[in-house]
Amino acid sequence: MGWLDRLRGKREADEIFVNDPSLPLVSILIRSMDRKTLDRAMRSAARQTWGNVEIIVVAACGSVHRALDEQCLGRPVRLVFDDERKRLSRPIAANVALESSRGEWLNFLDDDDELDASHVETLMKAVRSRRERVAYSATRVVDKRGKPIARVGHLGNHVQLFFHSRSASPAFAVHRSLIDDGARFDPSFDVHEDHDFQIACATRTDFLFVDAITATWHGQIGESGCGFGPNDNHAQRIATVTRIREKWNKPLERWLRKFDDVLFVGKLYLDGGDLPAALECLERALALRPTDVNALNFCGMANFAAGGLDRAEELVSRAVKRLPRRPALRHNLARIRARRAEFSEP
């Protein structure tokens, strides 16, 4: 590290923030297992350019949690224990955090993740044209060395909740009125409790997406099985998503009956290479409108990408019959037939 980097680090460490009570208070809620990374997470919360922030740290590890200063870089900090000072599951710790907060807006942050300094301000200054009570941005996922490996969080709609949460938790802010309306974390979900909670919110409000990366998820760290690489438990995820679909069957099916939303999300998954989700959405869209040219074409190309050449040719041929002069459709049909010819060659 050079002298300029050391000087910059010292200035950051010495910077003190003073809250401005004229601005809406934002509570940053940290469920803490008292990891070494907690200080880093707290500093990232304290350095927000938004002028009114409180930091709530819930001692999820129980009575063994170390004491914390009442301020971090000038921002108020409160360390909260369960009444019995016992170890807490993730959803119970989340509910304790919600009930302990004072902010108008609430934003979770795991003790091993980070917020960009602009995160809260980016969400708070976004225009909520439909009075959305959830605002979320994108999150960069980094590996154990801090190298970016993925991005989580895109424009979409509630259809995405059939497959996964719409945002990583650090990039997801909720208005207090949702908590007043009864939105809570379900204690029966030991993992993916944020997915369940987002559906609870989605049954009450639209979401606003802000197209900016404002948080960092250290996705390969931890043992929850909800991350990336060594922290990805595929079987656990499938089992939990199945339970979530059973619990929220009625709203999920209602969202899945909205043709435009299903088609839009299906095209997103197709462009992003998530073929199982793309096929699920696009076949559903086609069932809703069997003669829609876009549904025929996109569903055909999803089948083509997945190796279903018979189904692909059938669907795109139907699209061409409806719009025979559209070059893109004829091009797609030619691609499918060329691929079939490759497989039929001796």
Image (cartoon, rainbow, N blue to C red):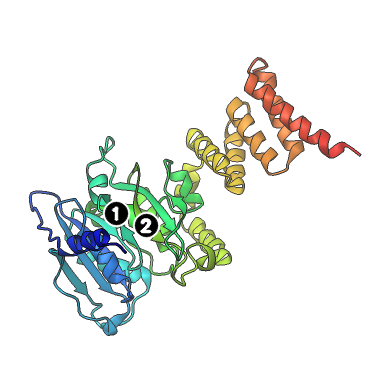
Name the foreground residue: 291 vs 20: 20
Q: What residue do we see at 21% from left, 58% from top? A: 47
Q: The disc labelled 1 sits on which kind of residue?
A: Asp
Instruction: Tell me where residue 101 appears, x and y as whole percent.
Output: 20, 63
Query: Does residue 256 appear left or right of residue 217 in this picture?
Result: right
Mark closest to the chain's N terminus, 2 or 1 = 1
Q: Quadrant of the C terminus?
A: top right
The reply to whether residue 341 is in sight is yes
Instruction: Quickly name the residue at label 2.
Output: 216
Residue identified by numbered label 1: 116
* Up/down of 123 relative to 191, above or below: above
Q: Residue at x 30, y 48 (%)?
A: 134
The amino acid type, in three-letter code, at marker 2 is Thr
Name the image quarter holding residue 179. Answer: bottom left
Q: Are marks 2 and 1 in contact (CB under 8 Å)?
A: yes
Of residue 207 and residue 23, the one placed in the foreground of this image is 23
Q: Nearer the viewer, residue 187 or 124?
A: 124
Element carrying mark 2: strand
